[in-house]
Image (cartoon, coloured by chain):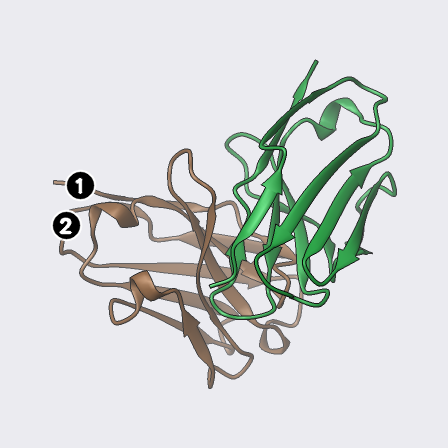
Chain colours: A brown, B green
């Protein structure tokens, strides 16, 4: 059974940093594209970033370019999202998902950016 | 960016009804279209990928069709557990984009 478990969310002040992690199991992690998607309260889903199998390709939505960095550690079956210079509009539940078509999703991690 | 527009935005239906949700892309996306179901407070669940391929474990009452710019998700006979919000998503090009969602409610 595929399991994706996010961690690292919390309350952070504007301008602060946070690192999200996603622990994967139940599939061959190193064979899959991985993705971060977020959902602000009451809003639609928003793709944030994704990364290919070996980490050589990374793509970001414009609103996070230069502030967020996606990475992975295939030896640890883990996906990461380093979030810097956080803004109030980054407040959302952040999900990790696997596969090019987002086949399975984690339960989400809440990130709140507020003073 | 490719805009994804779903219709209707909300829908009331009864158990046993046949329901169709439409998704239109602002430009052609071939068949790089997925559908997701989300219940309140829960993570999205993948239903369909490549416009018409059913994810493993998803009931056969769900089906998808379309190519290019116009797509549909059909639920052949609504069950109580199907009342949720449904999102389409294109993964043909970056940025990957989602529709605004269709909220399916019990009549």
Q: Which structural element holds mark 1?
A: loop
Quadrant in which the N terminus of chain A is drawn: bottom right
Quadrant in which the C terminus of chain A is drawn: top left
Provide the chain ID for the residue under circle 1. Answer: A
Front one among A52 and A18? A52
Say which residue appears at 21% left-offset and 55% top-offset: A86
Q: Quadrant of residue A32?
A: bottom right
The residue lying furthest to the top in this view is B107
Q: Quadrant of residue A31?
A: bottom right
Where is residue B21? Give x, y as percent.
71, 38
Q: Which of the numbered marks, if any, corresponds to residue A14?
A: 2
Image side of residue B82 versus residue B43, left or right: right
Say which residue appears at 55% left-offset and 62% top-offset: A24
Say which residue appears at 39% left-offset and 52% top-offset: A7
In the image, residue A110 sits, relative to residue B9, either above or below, namely below
* Mark 2 → mark 1, Cα distance in angstroms: 6 Å
In the image, residue A99 sits, relative to residue B81, either above or below, namely below
Q: Which structural element holds mark 2?
A: loop
Q: Which of the numbered marks, if any, corresponds to residue B75?
A: none
Q: Residues at badges 2 and 1 in contact (C-beta under 8 Å)?
A: yes
Q: Are marks 2 and 1 on the same chain?
A: yes
Q: Which of the numbered marks, if any, corresponds to residue A114?
A: 1
Image side of residue B76 versus residue A71, left or right: right
Q: Quadrant of residue A81?
A: bottom left
Q: Label 2 crowding class (10 Å Cα cut-off): few <14, some 14-19, many 20+? A: some
Front one among A74 and B9? B9
């Amino acid at each position: 059974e595929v399991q994706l478990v996010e961690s690292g969310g919390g309350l952070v002040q504007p301008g602060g940093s946070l690192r999200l992690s996603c622990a994967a199991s139940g599939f061959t992690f190193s064979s899959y594209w991985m993705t971060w998607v977020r959902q602000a309260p009451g809003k639609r889903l928003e793709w944030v970033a994704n990364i290919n199998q070996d980490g050589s390709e990374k793509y970001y939505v414009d609103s996070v370019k230069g502030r967020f960095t996606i990475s992975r550690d295939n030896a640890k079956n883990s996906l990461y999202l380093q979030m810097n210079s956080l803004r109030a509009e980054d407040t959302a539940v952040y999900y990790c998902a696997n596969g090019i078509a987002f086949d399975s999703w984690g339960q989400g991690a809440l990130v709140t950016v507020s003073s | 960016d490719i805009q994804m527009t779903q219709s209707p935005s909300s829908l009331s239906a009864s158990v046993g009804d046949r329901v169709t949700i439409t998704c239109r892309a602002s430009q052609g996306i071939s068949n790089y279209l997925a559908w997701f179901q989300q219940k309140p407070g829960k993570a999205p669940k993948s239903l369909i990928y490549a416009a018409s391929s059913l994810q493993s474990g998803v009931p056969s009452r769900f089906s998808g069709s379309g190519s290019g710019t116009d797509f549909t998700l059909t639920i052949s006979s609504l069950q109580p557990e199907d009342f949720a919000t449904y999102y389409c998503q294109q993964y043909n090009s970056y940025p990957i984009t989602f529709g605004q969602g269709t909220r399916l409610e019990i009549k």
